[in-house]
Image (cartoon, helix red, strand yellow):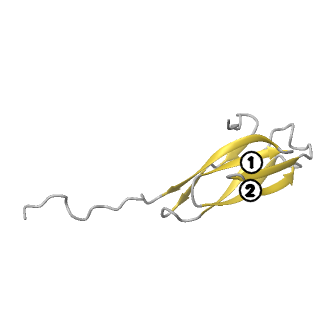
Amino acid sequence: MPVEASPGEWQIAPSTCFTNKPGEPCRLQIRVTLPAKLSNSQQEVCFYLNEQLLKCLRSNTPEMLIPVTLTENAELQIKVDGSKKAAKKLLVQSLVPNKRRRVKSPWSFF
């Protein structure tokens, strides 16, 4: 059962990364705003991308920047002292569609 960031508490942005072509790596700075009750509690906040640990920090500031490189859609999870507190889907979209255009028409007289 995924836990979603509830409005007014956790804020995670942006959630979409754009690339020029499909399959290109996409670099993204994710801004995470902690709830007020957690921002100066000195608890350990850990960030996971698809179940892999990115980094752990002490929550001494209300806002954190997490650099992420994506090649496909992923899920960012935030755990505080080992328990899951928030999750957010991160999407990768390309500006060029992943389809080839037809050069010839599908029919012919000859």
Q: Residue at x 92, y 47 (%)?
A: 42
Which amino acid type corresponds to the residue marked 1 in the rendered image? Val
> Could you tell me residue 95's position as x and y percent?
47, 58
Q: Earlier in the sequence, mark 2 or mark 1?
A: 1
Q: Secondary structure at mark 1?
A: strand
Quadrant placement of the C terminus = bottom left
Name which residue type carries label 2: Ile
Q: Could you say where residue 75 lies in the image, as x and y percent from the top left?
A: 65, 49
> On screen, 73 above or below 27?
above
Please name the residue shown 27% across and 61% down the image: 102
Q: CA distance from mark 2 to mark 1?
A: 8 Å
The residue beneath circle 1 is 32
Q: Nearer the viewer, residue 1 or 65?
A: 1
Q: Residue furthest left?
A: 110
**Residue identified by numbered label 2:** 66
* Mark carried by residue 47: none
Q: The N terminus appears in which quarter of the rendering?
A: top right
- In the image, taking residue 15 as reference, residue 5 lies left or right, namely right
- Residue 23 in picture, x, y percent from top left: 52, 63
